[in-house]
Image (cartoon, grey):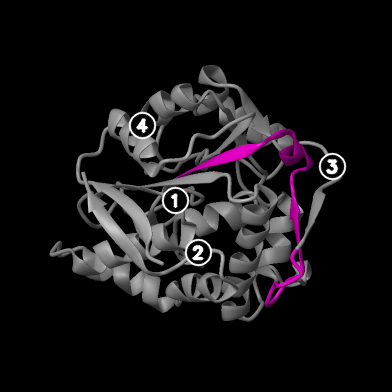
Amino acid sequence: MAAKVYFSKKITPEKVVELYKLAGKELTGKVAIKLHSGEEGNQNFLRPEFWKPIIEYVGGTVVECNTAYEGSRDTTERHLKTLEKHGWSTNFTVDLMDAEGPDLELSIPKGKRIQKNFVGKNMTNYDSMLVLSHFKGHPMGGYGGALKQLSIGVASSFGKAYIHGAGEPEKIWTSDHDSFLESMADAAMSIVDHFKGNIVYVNVMKNMSVDCDCCAVAEDPCMKDIGILASLDPIAIDQACLDLVYKADDPGRDHLIERIESQNGVHTIEAAAALGYGSREYELITV
């Protein structure tokens, strides 16, 4: 059955709230709001003022996890300073979910590449999740969207290395590439299962660089902004974003597509669809 994906070309904080409402699921209990806090030096990540209306509307807690690479977010001490510097902890309640160990281990019995996922132990404090994704390119994943946020984004520092290494964290940068992409799909499934589908996804196609917000030195955006999408299906929303890039008549699209295809980015979507927690078939509803 085709998933509903709501789309607006207008990109404003208020439009994010409107599309969230259209998605049709009220997030109840204690809500974790997963977003990208931005590596220090990155110029493209979406700032607190953009996300503020939706965060306040949902009334949730901004959640993040430490990185597995050197930078301004690789230790709890440095990440907390970055969260403050970028305005997250000064504007919202923030939870660095893996600030202290031990990690929470989630089982993935149907995982193709990994059968367990390691996330910040504080995730057990939440009943539902709002995934706010900045859609753009990514040096390793090809693109970054909802599936990346669910997997690498929610994983602890060790969990990130575990996913990258396809179950062998010591091979964080040297594992078979498609195995890494399939591990992301596996890890994302564990979060969907943990929250029993009580998740809403918003992808914002703005500031679309070939590089991720995790890059301290990132290329400037290569194509014009496209819009905002919202859905209850993480696979459908990412597929819709890819399709919108391919359909664009912007001359910069070729540069972004080259990044996506050079890293076989669509394979994460293919692997996730094969696992069955969403669909690549969708109905795009323009509002």
Q: 232 or 227, which is in the foreground?
A: 232
Q: Residue at x 71, y 72 (%)?
A: 110
Contact between marks 4 and 2 (CB within 8 A): the answer is no
Relative to 26, does residue 142 appear above or below in the rendering?
below
Question: Which amino acid, by three-letter code, is at mark 4?
Answer: Val
Q: What residue is disc 4 on?
A: 17
Label 4 neighbour load within 10 Å: few <14, some 14-19, many 20+ = many
Residue interval drawn in magenta: 108-132
The reply to whether the magenta stretch includes residue 191 is: no
Q: 232 or 177, which is in the foreground?
A: 232
Q: Is residue 228 left or right of residue 170?
A: left
Relative to 257, does residue 178 appear above or below in the rendering?
below
Residue 103 in picture, x, y percent from top left:
82, 47
Query: Which of marks 1 and 2 precedes in the sequence?
Result: 1
Q: What residue is disc 2 on?
A: 278
Question: Which amino acid, by three-letter code, is at mark 3?
Answer: Gly
Residue 76 in picture, x, y percent from top left:
72, 36
Question: How far is disc 3 from disc 4 in space, using C-alphas?
Answer: 34 Å
Q: Residue at x 45, y 54 (%)?
A: 212
Q: What residue is disc 1 on?
A: 217
